[in-house]
Amino acid sequence: MIDFSCIDFSKFSLIDLIISITSTIRGKDFCSDFVISELKSKVEEANLYINSETDDKKRFKKLLYLFYVRWNFTSSNGVYKLSDSLWIDNVLKNKKGTAISLGIIFFHISKELNFPLSIVLFPTQLILRVDWSKGDKYLVDPFNGQFLNDHILEVWLKGNISPTAKLNKNDLKADNFLTIIKKVLNTFKTALMEEKKMDLALIANKILLQITPNDPYEIRDRGLIYSQLDCDHIALADLIYFIEHCPEDPISEIIKIQIHSIEQKKVVLH
């Protein structure tokens, strides 16, 4: 198990980090050996499938075809529990995932085959970026393997962020593993909170607090989770911490109502 409080992210592969996180959250319910074996098998099959091509771009397009058409990895539309489409073992079994889970699996296979791939946490969703030697690039939607261009990405921004949003270069910068892991953990935590799996959400939250101790937003979420677990004295301290450190945040007013509710419950109990 990786200690995320003092980790050098450059010394681990992304899939190793994801496996460690998932194992920490789910414990014996998660079989890391299955994931490692399945990914190894996929890499070997992919290597054989694209090996007849010598041109890297053609090899990459064949890999996309293999992953999204022949293996039939696809988006998890209609999946009842969001976490089911985030857990890497479930996605390998069911072939249905989110941009994050599909993107991480495809990223791992691509890197094992030496493609120059990186992950971009675009404002609307995770996307994949391939930088070729002559300076050109591919941008790929991990939901379906389709290529993206600036026009499509700007439409996404306008539709999801603001009608006046514009695409800029920073939106397409490759992200490091630390940023990606924090995004994955936050996505896990949010999904588990929505599914009322507070004990698992708390573990995800604790890993995040190992990475960024004293983060008021993570402490706020810990307080919200503890309130659902009826640990009101801990919840109250965490929520008050958030109010004191982020008084201007719009959600502070909602948190104040939560604090008042907990305090009233304590009065009733005593």
Image (cartoon, rainbow, N blue to C red):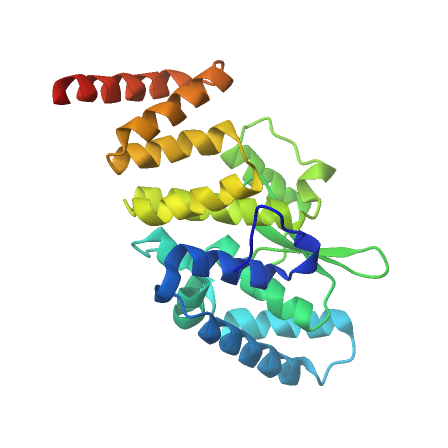
Q: Is residue 18 left or right of residue 198?
A: right
* Residue 246 seen in render: no
Q: Position of residue 21 (x, y in %)?
A: 49, 56
Above/below status of 153 relative to 216: below
Q: Position of residue 136 (x, y in %)?
A: 80, 56
Q: Is residue 115 left or right of residue 49?
A: right
Residue at 73 percent of width and 39 percent of height: 169
Of the 4 image quadrants, the one containing the C terminus is: top left
Residue at 57 percent of width and 78 percent of height: 40
Residue at 56 percent of width and 37 percent of height: 212
Above/below status of 232 relative to 3: above
Q: Is residue 102 left or right of residue 133?
A: left
Q: Looking at the picture, tell me which residue is in the foreground, 117 or 8.
A: 8
Residue at 17 percent of width and 17 percent of height: 267
Residue furthest front in the image = 270
Q: Looking at the picture, tell me which residue is in the foreground, 265 or 138.
A: 265
* Residue 208 seen in render: yes
Q: Looking at the picture, tell me which residue is in the foreground, 13 or 57.
A: 13
Question: For residue 196, which quarter of the picture?
Answer: top left
Question: For residue 56, which quarter of the picture?
Answer: bottom right
Q: Position of residue 7 (x, y in %)?
A: 63, 51
Above/below status of 1 relative to 240: below
Q: Looking at the picture, tell me which residue is in the foreground, 250 or 79.
A: 250
Above/below status of 4 relative to 168: below
